[in-house]
Amino acid sequence: EIRGREAARVEREARQRQQEEESRRQADEARRQAEEAKRQAGKARQERITAAMAAGEDAARKGLSEVALSRYRQALAEVERYGEQDVTVRKAIISSLGSMVPPPTIPGDALRFMARGEAKVKMGGTAGFKGAAEEMEQAVQAAPWVADAYFNLGIVQEKAEMYREAIRNLQMYLFAAPRSPNASAIQARIYAMEVLAEEKEKVLGLAGSWRSAGGNTYNVTVDGNRIRIEGAAVYKTSGGDKQKYHFTHDLEKKGSVLEGSLTIARDGINGCYFPNETVPESGFLRADGKYLKVEWKETLYSWTWQGTVCTGVTSMGKSGTSLELVEKIAAQ
């Protein structure tokens, strides 16, 4: 009887392993098929883009500007916005219209989107500028040859802190209006935005898990120039006990300087409990964005107990300490 039960158990485990292996095989096959379908779709899309561009270039050489514009717009509908092909197609459209007399009429949709964007600009604030940028994006899709549409979109995106997109659109404006009297000022504006974009990307690059100099793991989230660092650390007390601290750093980046506050929550120990504490802190982010340090002063405590009963918690004043994030942990 015992041998029979053992044999049944072995059979069940073998059947379960077989089922798990079949499930893994099916999942792998489903992933493979999905990747192949994606590859084929990408290949077909690229073939459509190539064909439309070739037809547009052929029509442009023959002086058939209207036909060229139609073919280029087919390509524009397929390319990824702000990718290199997007730039190539838009420049081809702008170039092909140079010989059109009179220039094409701006579609009503484009005028509507521009007006809606201007209305949202008047709302002000980051949300208003982002909403305006969404409207004006539609304008440069509907009329990709209109220089002023790129200029207005770029300026709104700059105010919305969408610096990389703003740079692309102002560059497109300069391509469409090379004799603009403001060309030098706009180019200088582009150079300034490159610095802002680099700084923004540096801060965004902080998001994720980091290892501290003490070997603890901290999670970093980013919202604009605001940085939150959350984590915990275990410290050994003078009596040999271990106490866990929970940290929440709320910081704002101002240039390379970090300023904000730290909230500390300490776990109880030996029946003694300690008040949460919020203290000011400051620090810096290294120029390459790969090292961060903040410093603060926190309250130190001593405590006494008998058995599991706390008999006293006493503040011993403030002590300076710091956190150094030294290594970003790669996402699994």
Image: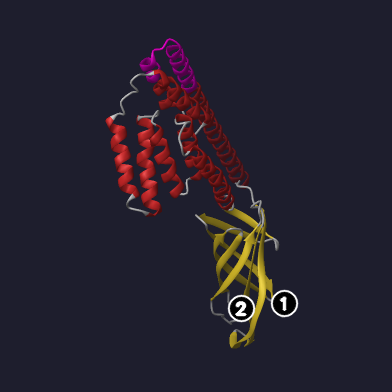
Q: Nearer the viewer, residue 294 or 22?
A: 294
Can you give x and y, in whole percent of width and height, for residue 255 in the image?
58, 58
Query: What kind of residue is marked 1?
Result: Gly
Residue at the front extreme of this rendering? 181
219 to the left or right of 95:
right
Residue at the location (43% across, 20% down)?
Answer: 96
Q: Nearer the viewer, residue 136 or 290?
A: 136
Query: What kind of residue is marked 2?
Result: Ile
Residue at the location (36% across, 45% down)?
Answer: 132
Placement of 75 over or under 213, stated as above or below: above
Colouring rule applied to residues: secondary structure
- Main SS of the magenta part reads helix
Q: Quadrant of residue 62?
A: top left
Q: Which residues are magenta?
A: 44-70
Q: Is residue 208 magenta?
A: no
Placement of 177 over or under 302, stated as above or below: above
Can you give x and y, in whole percent of width and height, for residue 1 in the image?
59, 46
Q: Nearer the viewer, residue 131 or 328?
A: 131
Q: Badge 1, how many Cα within 10 Å: few under 14, some, many 20+? A: few
Residue at the location (49% across, 37% down)?
Answer: 183
Can you give x and y, in whole percent of width and height, for residue 321 in the image?
67, 72
Residue 81 appears in the rendering: no
- Disc 1 and disc 2 in contact, CB within 8 angstroms: no
- Residue of label 1: 240
279 to the left or right of 148:
right
Tag 1 secondary structure? loop
Tag 2 secondary structure? loop
Q: Is residue 69 magenta?
A: yes
Q: Quadrant of residue 108?
A: top left
Q: Badge 2, how many Cα within 10 Å: few under 14, some, many 20+? A: some
- Residue of label 2: 269
